[in-house]
Image (tube, rainbow, N blue to C red):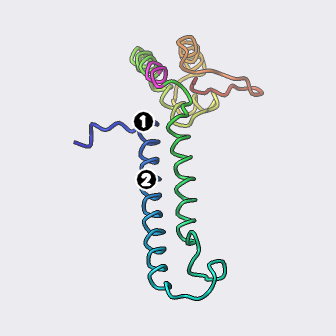
Amino acid sequence: MLSNISLSRKNIGAIIIVISLFIFVLSYLYMDTVKKLDAQLHKDCDLPDEICPFKKNIPPEAAAGFAVSAVTGLFGAFVYFSSPKNEKEVAEKLSRSKEILSRLDIDEKKIYGMIAESGSVFQSELVEKSGMSKVKITRLLDRLESKGVVERKRRGMTNIVMVKQ
């Protein structure tokens, strides 16, 4: 039943907004109860309203609850309305990258896995870790680069190889 719920940014934002509303309602109920109780307990109080500590407009605890509710609600609205990219574009890119990766041969997948595991790696390290020759690694990286899955950046006498975003 719960596995059907998708935790997208909008859903997470909506959940945070609901939590902030819950905090607001609890704070309001607390404030209302305290005010009614103070009114009942101090109905015979002779002190003027501005001096009597029990005739405050909003108890400090309720004010703190309202502040937490406001901050939480603003954060929820930010999460709900902000989106780094359109979710459809992200899904399309993911499906395209899966399609490209499915077309890689065994050696290309091995090298790509080594690069993806560390994020970036020196080309010379790929030679050492894979046990393949420098020429073979260079050719594999040429093919991976032409397929658009990795990129090489020159660093001194070697290259740094990274997964292309």
Return the residue at label 1. 8
Q: Please give the range of residues in magenta.
A: 87-93
Residue at horizontal 44%, vertical 81%?
Answer: 40
Residue at horizontal 60%, vertical 17%?
Answer: 138
Looking at the image, do the residues carrying marks 2 and 1 touch, with CB atoms under 8 Å apart?
A: no
* Of 161 and 26, the residue lying toward us: 26
Q: Residues within 10 Å of mark 2 (few under 14, many from 20)?
A: some
Q: Residues within 10 Å of mark 1 (few under 14, many from 20)?
A: few
Tell me the tag on residue 19.
2
Name the side, left or right, on which 91 lies relative to 58. Answer: left
The quadrant of the image that shows the C terminus is top right
Distance Cα–Cα, label 2 vs label 1: 17 Å
Residue at horizontal 54%, vertical 60%?
Answer: 66
Answer with mark 2 or mark 1, whichever residue precedes in sequence: 1
- Residue 15: where, in percent of width, then height? 41, 46
Residue at horizontal 53%, vertical 19%?
Answer: 149
Q: Mark 1: which secondary structure?
A: loop
Residue 107 drawn in magenta: no
- Residue 58: where, in percent of width, then height? 56, 69
